Image (cartoon, helix red, strand yellow):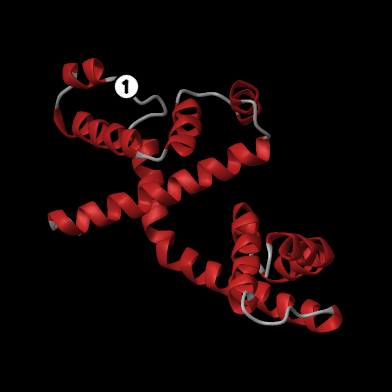
Amino acid sequence: MTEAELAQVIEASKQTVLRAIQSNLPGEQHASVEDVAQETYLRYFLAFRNKQALQGDDLQRWLYVAARNECRRAARKNRREGFALFRFDWTFRKSSLAIPDSAAIESESGEFAESKARVRLHVDRMPEPFREATLLRLKGMKMAEIARSLGISAGTVKSRLARGREWLARYTNANANEEGRI
């Protein structure tokens, strides 16, 4: 399957895939729509890259079922990571919205300062697009301000923040397990 053929498949079936996602993806996971759609088309490409591509109703049915299954996978993943996301979100709220720089961290003492330092360390290790949006949000900027500042849509800001929280939850959960805190 060539890139042009895949583009034709996407154009011919995007309404079907979006309908399947809308019907099967839980509302609290609206930030995952793009990921689910991409995974659906990736599965199609991998399944038919060396075979005859599907056409018409067969294509629509295959992609609908694949999108439905991707929604179910995303929901299971969200349930698995839900506790970690809640725990890290609570840590952010506990440590205030503004993440201090290193000098401000050194001037504080106790568990609160240690928590802020840990949050700052994890945010600094975050992949660039997520880190940038997260830092601006933690400085108190609104979604629209972040979107204007970065030159992206508000939906992209929401998606980057959601993915940033997921990344932080996974990363901090893995570190906590390694250190024996959980």
Question: How many neighbours does mark 1 have within 10 angstroms: few (below 14), some (14-19), or many (20 or more)?
Answer: some
* Residue at 24% across, 20% down: 102
Name the residue located 35 percent from the left edge and 26 percent from the top edge: 99
Task: Give left or right: position of 114 versus 44.
Answer: left
- Element on which disc 1 rests: loop
The spot of residue 21 in percent (x, y) is 70, 66
**Residue corresponding to mark 1:** 100
Query: Which of the 4 image quarters holds residue 159?
Result: top right
Quarter holding the C terminus is: bottom left
Task: Decide which of 69, 176 is in the foreground and name it.
Answer: 69
Q: What residue type is labelled 1?
A: Pro
Q: Is residue 35 left or right of residue 100?
A: right
19 left or right of 143? right
Q: Which residue is drawn at 66% across and 41% down?
A: 155
Place of residue 115 in the rendered image (x, y in percent of width and height, measured from the top left): 24, 36
Q: Where is residue 171 in the image (x, y as percent from the top left)?
A: 31, 51
Q: In this view, does 180 lie above or below 160?
A: below
Up/down of 16 relative to 27, above or below:
below
- Identify the residue shown where x is 29% and y is 19%: 101
Res. 93 image quadrant: top left
The spot of residue 139 in percent (x, y) is 46, 23
